[in-house]
Image (cartoon, rainbow, N blue to C red):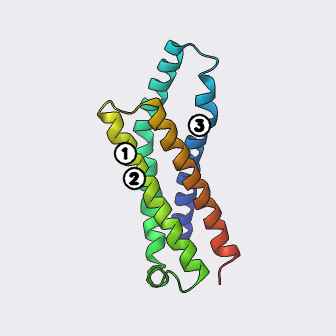
Amino acid sequence: MSHFLLVTLHLLCAMIFVGTVFFEIFILDDLRSSLSRDEMRKVAIEVGRRLRRLMPFVLAILYSAGIAMAWGYRDVLARPFESSFATMLSLKILLAISVFFHFIVAVTLGARGRLRAKALRYIHGSVLIHVLSIVILAKAMFAFAS
């Protein structure tokens, strides 16, 4: 698969994922103040149902493309502190792994009926910080790489 196609798929899926996190934090949570508890529950259930169908495919493509691109940098990643590029790429990968584990925790808690609003807000906030850091690192890797 061409590098251009990998980058394009990776970026499109990253946009969907980051947009979803943004939507859940800044749009959906804000609706709580203007909807009744029952209405909000219905909205949350429906949004959650749709996301559970979509996100596994988005994440599979996002991470598969990311792994394929990282494979091309395996020599650089073998020495993560040798250059700023290698360090930033390594940090970006560690953050991406952490995001994946956040997703696994959320899915596991949800499947067990133990995903509460407080935990979900924490996970969403943490994931938002992670993905914003990943985006900044992605740009910085090429702007400040040495």
Residue 16: x and y in percent read 56, 47
User: The disc labelled 3 sits on which kind of residue?
Assistant: Ile
Residue at x 57% of width, y 72% of height = 88
Q: How far separated are the C-alphas under marks 2 and 3?
A: 19 Å
The mark found on residue 25 in the picture is 3
Q: Quadrant of the C terminus?
A: bottom right
Residue 67, given in percent of the width and then of the height, sits at: 43, 67
Q: Secondary structure at mark 3?
A: helix
Label 3 Cα neighbours within 10 Å, binned few <14 / some 14-19 / many ≥20? some
Q: Residue furthest left?
A: 112
User: In x, y percent, where is residue 102?
Assistant: 42, 49
Q: Which residue is mark 2?
A: 101
Of 109 and 67, the residue lying toward us = 109
Distance Cα–Cα, label 2 vs label 1: 6 Å
Camera-nearest residue between 60 and 134 = 134
| Mark 1 lies on residue | 105
Vertical comparison of 31 with 87: above or below: above
The reply to whether residue 123 is visible in this rendering is yes
Residue that sits furthest to the right in the current view:
143
- Total numbered circles: 3
Tell me the CA gap for discs 1 and 3.
18 Å
The residue at 47%/36% (across/down) is 120
Q: Dot 2 surroundings within 10 Å: few (below 14), some, or many (20 or more)?
A: few
- Image marks 1 and 3: residues in contact by CB distance under 8 Å: no
